Amino acid sequence: RGELVSSATVTALMRRRMRSFPGRRVLLDGFPRSLENARDFVELCGPPELALHLDCEDTVLLERILARGGLTAREAKLAEEEGKDEGEATKAVRADDNIHTAISRLKNYHKHHRSTMDWLKKIKVPIVEIDCSGSKEEVWQQLMAIGRLMRPAVKLPSAAAAPTSSTASVDKSGEQSVSEDMQWIA
């Protein structure tokens, strides 16, 4: 239906899940969704290291949600006009990936977004703005770059062990790799 789950429930679930990854950074996808979520999270877990703000035009978001669900906006509207039962019209579609729920989600986002971002800024949480209007691949590359920046610095061996080499390795793609310390929770 596109409505928000109670903040206490969501925050408790997030905290429980995060405990599964002690000592690791956690990326909370789509959270906080409200100022209440943000405040509850900070009270239970402390302030986040940073917040990612993925910015995109509403029309692009709607197109992506509907494409993920398998229907274009036009197909959803035609199905509605023809009076087809939502289940019948969207058999292979996630129940919540329809035009009505997507619009409800956007309304909730716009209702809560600005106050949440302002509060995070007020408590000095760094906010990284990401333009998500490009392709999925372009957005993913931006997120991966931020992930690489968030990894710990490569540890150098002690001077006695090997003064001229580092412990980093290079993978097949030529990327320097270090130990993973981040978990994505969607």
Image: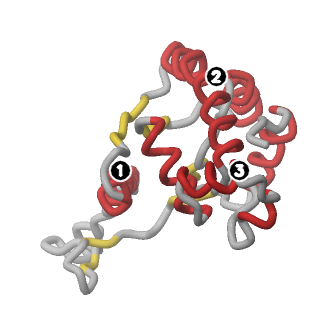
Q: Are marks 1 and 3 in contact (CB under 8 Å)?
A: no
Measured as percent of width and height from the top left, residue 104 is found at 69, 35
Density class for disc 3 (Cα within 10 Å; few <14, some 14-19, many ≥20) is: few
For the residues marked 3 and 2, what is the alpha-carbon distance in whole angstroms?
29 Å
> What's the amino acid at mark 2?
His
Q: Is residue 100 above or below residue 178?
A: above
Q: Amino acid at mark 3?
A: Glu
Closer to viewer: mark 1 or mark 3: 3
Asked where in the image residue 107 lies, by quadrant, the reply is top right
Q: Is residue 81 left or right of residue 74?
A: right
Looking at the rendered image, the quarter that the C terminus falls into is: bottom right
Q: Earlier in the sequence, mark 2 or mark 1?
A: 2
> Residue 175: x percent and y percent?
24, 73
Q: Position of residue 2 (x, y in %)?
A: 74, 40
First along the sequence among labels 1 and 3: 3
Spot occupied by residue 184 in the image (x, y as percentages of width and height): 57, 59
Residue highlighted by disc 1: 146
- Kindly identify which residue carries mark 3: 80
SS label for mark 3: helix
User: How far separated are the C-alphas under marks 2 and 1?
Assistant: 25 Å
